Amino acid sequence: MKLIIRIFSFAIMALALTASVLLFAMPSFSFNSNITLDVVKISKIVPETIYTKDVDIAYLLGTDEIHVGIKFKMYADGVAKSMGGNRDVINNSFVGSSVDDVVTTLHEPVDLITDFTIRSILKSTVKAEMTKQVDLVAQKLGSGSTGADILDELQINDEYFTNFSSSFYDAANKDDATIDSITDVLYQQIDLAVAKAEDAKDVINSGFTPEKRTEIKDNLVKILTDLKLVESSGKLVKISHISYFYLSTYLYNFLKDKVSNPASLEKRADEDNAQYSDRMVREFVFTQAPSQFYQGVGTVCVFLFIGLFVFAGLWLLLLGLTIYRTFFRKKPWPKFGIWFWIVGSFQLVLGLGLTIGGKYWLPRSNVNFGALPLKSAILAPRTYALTSSILFLIALAMGVALFVLKIVFGKKVTSESEEGK
């Protein structure tokens, strides 16, 4: 029986030593979480014009939300620095790195949103312009058919316009794209549609005159200017990069009256559009995150910092007392003590309780995210107490087992110890 008790004693010592080490070795605070972004809010980065106001981004993407993973770790030194709730310290300790991960993840959906939007605008615009020109031909011929009817008969249909919008997009996405170069692409397609209409009606001259071409070009310039895609030189902003331009422009206009130094929001000479937009997103999050968030983080860090040493001291005390009782006392029974259970139970709150609460309770709560484009958040927080809380449950099971053994064999073991057997 004494051998079994010795085994329990060594197991408790191993448990206490492991818990003490892991409390400092594990991250003090970490997230392995997921947030849900609101597509409607994100889509507001695209300027609203008569050409974009009816574009349904959620419909084009097939969803009204985007899920983004967030991961970060904060160790004991970061916890100590963040106890005051200082906004800059907390941003530099872990918020900044988390935002960097998010904006990197967001590049793809933002690109998709803008890509879909621009292609949709191009498709509807080209379709409207072609239909208008063919309709003029039909009117000149005295035909009872509309431009839309004629295009449909010629199988210049939705698939045709989808393919053409892709070709037009590719032409506008070239590094040296200009108004003239993409207008030429548009002319070619209109020439083709009008030619098919003329062949179908046995007419040679459509009246698609240079004046008409100029009118089409002027309309195209107006559309692209409204979309802020035309530079003063006549060169086009590369469409595949326009998402970052839109995003940074939107955030600049949003933040310029909300920061103490608006000049800090200007694009730097060494930044490209993607880098500039990423910096603006960081500034947006830092500016818009509510003060309650930083106060909450500061308060949590105070409890985490105090708890780290309290729990470590508790496990080390258990280790020391178990060593003493095992090697320096005649009565071999290891003992946890009432204070171990009282203080140690708080580990369950910081460990398992916080993790389960963040994962299951917070998503069901009504959280106001303010201007941030968030719909929901599953935070799934982790603290240094998660592992030690599991070890605490193991200690609890061992304590129950020792309690039963002491009831059954206590007197016998005690008498054997006193007799020196």
Image: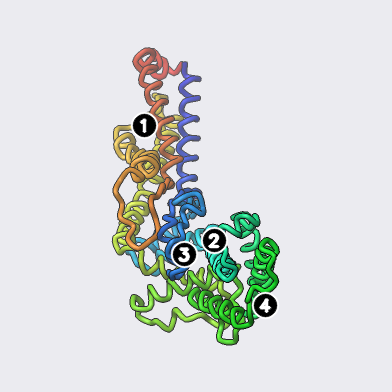
Residue 419 picture location, percent across and down: 41, 16
Q: Earlier in the sequence, mark 2 or mark 3?
A: 3
| Element type at mark 1 | loop
Three-letter amino acid code of the residue under disc 1: Phe
| Element type at mark 4 | helix
The structure residue drawn at horizontal position 43% and vertical position 46%, both measured from the top left corner, is: 382
Q: Quadrant of residue 153?
A: bottom right
Three-letter amino acid code of the residue under disc 2: Gly
Circle 1 crowding by C-alpha within 10 Å: few under 14, some 14–19, many from 20:
some
Pointer 3: what residue? 96
Q: Earlier in the sequence, mark 1 or mark 3?
A: 3
Whether 172 is drawn above or below 34: the answer is below
Circle 4 crowding by C-alpha within 10 Å: few under 14, some 14–19, many from 20:
some
Instruction: Tell us which disc is closer to us: 3 or 4.
Output: 4
The structure residue drawn at horizontal position 42% and vertical position 33%, both measured from the top left corner, is: 322
Residue 149 picture location, percent across and down: 56, 57
Pointer 4: what residue? 181
